[in-house]
Image: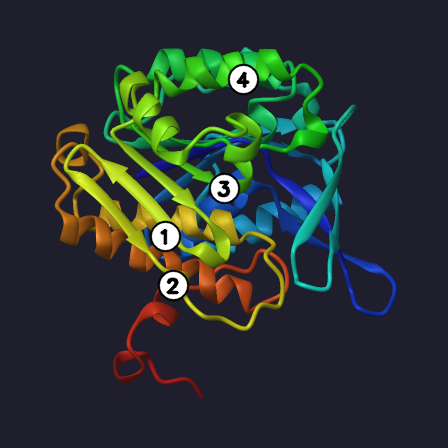
Amino acid sequence: MIIVAGEALVDLVPDRVGGYRPLPGGSPANTAVGLGRLGTPTALLARLADDRLGALLRAHLETSNVDLRHTAESTAPTTLAVVDVDQHGVADYSFYIDGCADGGWQPADLPAALPPDAALHVGGSFALAVEPMAGAFETLLSREHPHRVISLDPNIRPVLIHDHAAVRARLRRWLGMTDIVKVSADDLRWIAPDRPLADVVAEWHEQGPALVVVTRGPEGVHASSPTGQVDLPALPVDITDTVGAGDAFTAGLLAALDRDDLLTRTNLTTLTHAELTDTLTYAQRVAAITCTRPGADSPWFDELLPAEVRPATC
């Protein structure tokens, strides 16, 4: 099992007629949905509101095969993100957190124990930047990193960050407790402005992560492991929008590693060039399909199968 920890919220997405429609979202929740749809046993560790939008989130997660046993119930309203999409399909977000479910995280909301054979993925967007959630998740990482593989997507949201130095320091601590880090080129421009990619990746390897993956939009993807590096070009795709694309990539990455029994600390340090290439290619396909659809609508397992072996539909 892969346990995904972080926020679950509702995106208010433009409906193309001047209004907005509510869609389930939140980077970690999107990643959990992506994993569940790809057939990977998945659970979400999140706070879900006991309101109508919280019910929307629960239904979406459950129908996407996400186990909710590790969620905490909140009497505060569901967290909201207002999404604006530019002419190129690139999304920008405004968040409403204070007084909402994700704004009330406390260490007491953490489960007492996690399954011993599960990997843990942490979505950093809120967890890195928003207190008291950041403190609760640092407790989680400190407690769990001796016992399981940890994956991290910093998913930097500059609009949420008030103390840049504190968030950068927190990220350095978290990297020391991480085995896999997936980061976007936009994230890197905030985390390490004006520094060469190779220098940042080498420094991160020294801090902890065995696998560093950098998604670069139209420039493709770069990955570095103890056994070497892989660079792949971007897949050509007709973009509707990029909402949830990075989360879909993360889901594809983790699903492929899990499928091939590579999601262990030993196997992450011995990834072959072919294994890493296959993993990245699968993740790119998952993200590419998501970009062709409005909102964070990641593909199901059978959509990744070759056309000749897909199940027939009526």
Q: Which residue is mark 4?
A: 168
Of badges 4 and 2, nearer the viewer stands 4
Which image quadrant: the C terminus?
bottom left
Q: Amino acid at mark 3?
A: Ala
x and y, in percent, of residue 86 in the image: 73, 58
- Mark 1: which secondary structure? helix
Residue 84, above or below 154: below
Checking the image for residue 252, the label placed there is 1
- Mark 2: which secondary structure? helix
x and y, in percent, of residue 15 in the image: 78, 65
- Mark 4: which secondary structure? helix
The answer to whether any part of residue 163 appears in the image is yes
- Of pointers 4 and 3, the one earlier in the residue sequence: 4
- Of pointers 4 and 2, the one earlier in the residue sequence: 4
Q: Which residue is mark 2?
A: 285
- Mark 3: which secondary structure? helix
Residue 2, above or below 22: above
Q: Count neighbours of disc 1 (C-alpha within 10 A) and say few if under 14, some if 14 to 19, many if 20 or more.
A: many
Mark 4–mark 2 Cα distance, whole angstroms, equals 31 Å
Q: Amino acid at mark 4?
A: Arg
Residue at the (62%, 22%) spot, across then down:
129
